[in-house]
Image: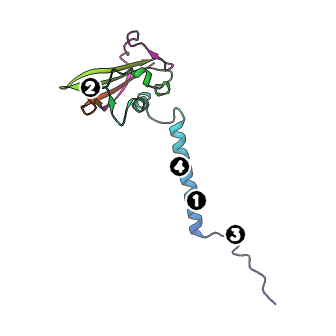
Amino acid sequence: MSMPFSRVNKGQTEPLAALVAVSAFLVGIGLYGAYVTDTLPGTNDRTPEETTIDRVWADLEDNGVFLAHESPRNVSNEIEPVSVPNGKYSRISVEVYTDGTPETIAVARFDDMGRPLSVEDADEPPAEARMAKRSVPVTVETHAAVRSGTLRVEVWS
C-alpha cells in the first residue's frame, strides 16, 4: 500500500523568487510615482521659470550653441507656445558679453496664452517677476567665434 501524497509543500514559494517578485513590484511603483510627479501639474517643486528656461533653450539651441552670427533671429517665432507658461506673461532674452559688458542680441515676449507680443508694444516685466538664467555659448561673427552668453527668462502674472 502506498502513502498518499503529502500536501504540506503545496502553494509554497521559494524565498528568493518571492524576494525578486516583491522587489520588482516596488521598483514598478517607484517608477510610476516618478512619472506622475514629472507629468502632473503642481506635483513637482520646479518653478515655472525653471521649466520655461529648459524648454526655451531646447527650442533655441543648435548643437548646444545659440547661433547669432548668421542673421538677426526672430526668437518669438522659434519658441513654441507650449514652451512658455500658460496663464503667465514671459520675457526671454539672450545676452552676449563683450569685454565683460552684456549686450542683448535677442528678445521675445509672450502673453498669458503663449502668443508672441511685439517687443515694442509690451510692457517691461514688473519688479515682482520671477527670473531664471543660465550661461549659454553664443556664436558672434562666425560659427567658430563663440562667446559666453546668458539666456534669461522672466515670468509674471
Q: What secondary structure is found at the residue carrying circle 1? A: helix
Q: CA distance from mark 4 to mark 3?
A: 29 Å
Disc 1 marks a residue whose amino acid type is Val
Q: Which residue is mark 2?
A: 96
Q: Secondary structure at mark 4?
A: helix
Residue 57 visible in the current orientation: yes
Q: Nearer the viewer, mark 3 or mark 2?
A: 2
Point out the tag, 3 or 1, that comes first from the N-terminus.
Answer: 3
Q: Position of residue 63 (x, y in %)?
A: 36, 37
Are there few (<14), some (14-19), or many (20+) residues within 10 Å of tag 2? many
Q: Position of residue 18 (x, y in %)?
A: 59, 64
> Is the N terminus in the top left, top right, bottom left or bottom right quadrant?
bottom right
Query: Which of marks 3 and 4 precedes in the sequence?
Result: 3
Mark 1–mark 2 Cα distance, whole angstroms, equals 54 Å
Residue placed at 37% from the left, 32% from the top?
61
Residue tagged by mark 4? 30
* Residue at the spot 51% in from the left edge and 44% down from the top edge: 34
**Residue at disc 3, secondary structure:** loop
Tell me whether the residue at label 3 lies in contact with that at label 1, contact meaning CB atoms closer than 8 angstroms: no
Q: Which residue is mark 3?
A: 11
Report crowding for label 1: few under 14, some 14 to 19, many 20 or more residues within 10 A (C-alpha).
few
| Label at residue 22 | 1
The part of the chain drawn in magenta is 113-137
Task: State which tag comes first along the sequence, 3 or 2.
Answer: 3
Left of 39 or right of it: where is 61? left
